[in-house]
Image (tube, grey):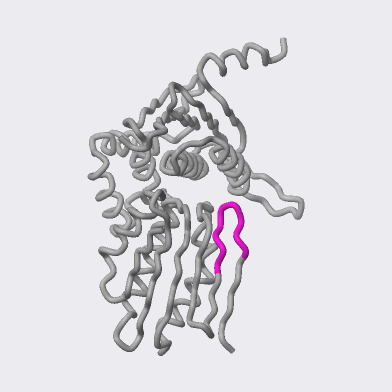
Amino acid sequence: MAFRLEKEKTTSTPFVLIDEEKKYMKLEGRSFNENVAEFFKEVNDWLDGYLTSNFGTFTFDCAISYFNSSTTKLLLNMLLKMDSHASKEKKIVVNWLTTEDNEIMVECGEDFRDDLNNLQFNLIIK
Amino acid sequence: MSFNVQLYNKMLTDNNVEVVYSGPIWSSGIDGMAEMLLKRLEYEDIPLNASQSVFSVFVEQMNNMLMYSAERHFLTNLDGTQISSSKGIYILGVKEGAYFIQTGNVVTSSNAEILRARIDFLNTLDKKELRQYYKQQLIAGNDNPVSKGAGIGLIEIARRASEPIKYEIDKLDNGSLYFTMHVIIKQGGKQ
């Protein structure tokens, strides 16, 4: 059965949706929990397996409005992992969704984009 | 004589201090304080850049205290499980239109030296250099063996601060070291 994970957002942890059937993942809200590695463990564990499968096209919408430095590092590692698996046969689309006045997220998106070569990184500023 | 609250209040007012917290710091406790700060920033009509910067400095400073305070205690939950907490002080104020966040906690001498070296170095970098250094450190990994976090919180603080980070390391009567940090964020955003 296709994996599905849905976590409601809290003050310091984001909304998480993984819908394997739809080949889709979404993060939304704020992420600054001190124990961010533990929070994202389930997501990372799933990704490790999923990325080795022949998924075709996978989409990740990242609509986080604020994250702390620990989350930044974790997310960059997640994106680098995706990037290492992305290819012609395994297309990965990352939509980095933010707003023009959110300078932290815009700059971070720009910086991340520079390091990602194989996946399609769309910086979408509204 | 009991603690003089009226005098304390005068000291706070005279020094433009608006919020003070002193006591245990633990993960979900930070969430509570964060909610209060977010609400406050929402009520104040300031650019998102400035409120994000204030919030970001708050988060990183609280996380730093949680990780590095040398005064640690265990808090016991109702179900008997224990969580680690640190002791520290957090102060938020507004002076001449600029926010300031001050924190204070006891540190070990080795952490005091790490903090001194790092902050002194970060204060030599401009915003562009800080952005590059931040990214470099994200990729390079963690160079601080005692750090449980990403070790890049201080760079983030320096990026959001409008002025160089001020800090002091004082020796207490009992010989331990007290670290205080003072970060200013102007409402117009970054310089």
- Residue A1, given in percent of the width and then of the height, sits at 59, 89
Residue B64, visible in the rendered structure = no
The residue depicted at 39 percent of the width and 71 percent of the height is: A94
- Residue B22, given in percent of the width and then of the height, sits at 60, 30
Residue B21, visible in the rendered structure = yes
Task: State the extent of the magenta-drawn residues as a range.
Answer: A8-16
Q: Is residue B101 above or below residue A109?
A: above
Q: Is residue B177 above or below residue A9?
A: above
In magenta segment, residue A10: yes
Q: Is residue B79 above or below residue B166?
A: below
The residue depicted at 41 percent of the width and 50 percent of the height is: A102
- Residue B127, given in percent of the width and then of the height, sits at 27, 41
Q: Is residue B100 above or below residue A64?
A: above
Left or right of A84 on screen, residue A42: right
Left or right of B137 on screen, residue B172: right
**Where's the C terminus of chain B, which quadrant?**
top left
**What is the quadrant of residue B122 in the picture?**
top left
Left or right of B92 on screen, residue B127: left
**Where's the N terminus of chain B, which quadrant?**
top right
The residue depicted at 51 percent of the width and 20 percent of the height is: B16
**What is the quadrant of residue B37 in the picture?**
top right
Between residue A22 and residue A34, name the one nearer to us. Answer: A22
The residue depicted at 29 percent of the width and 86 percent of the height is: A88
In magenta segment, residue B120: no
> Mostly what secondary structure, the magenta segment?
loop
Residue extending furthest toward the right? B78
Q: What is the tally of numbered marks visible in this picture?
A: 0
- Residue A34, given in percent of the width and then of the height, sits at 52, 52
Between residue B98 and residue B100, name the one nearer to us. Answer: B98
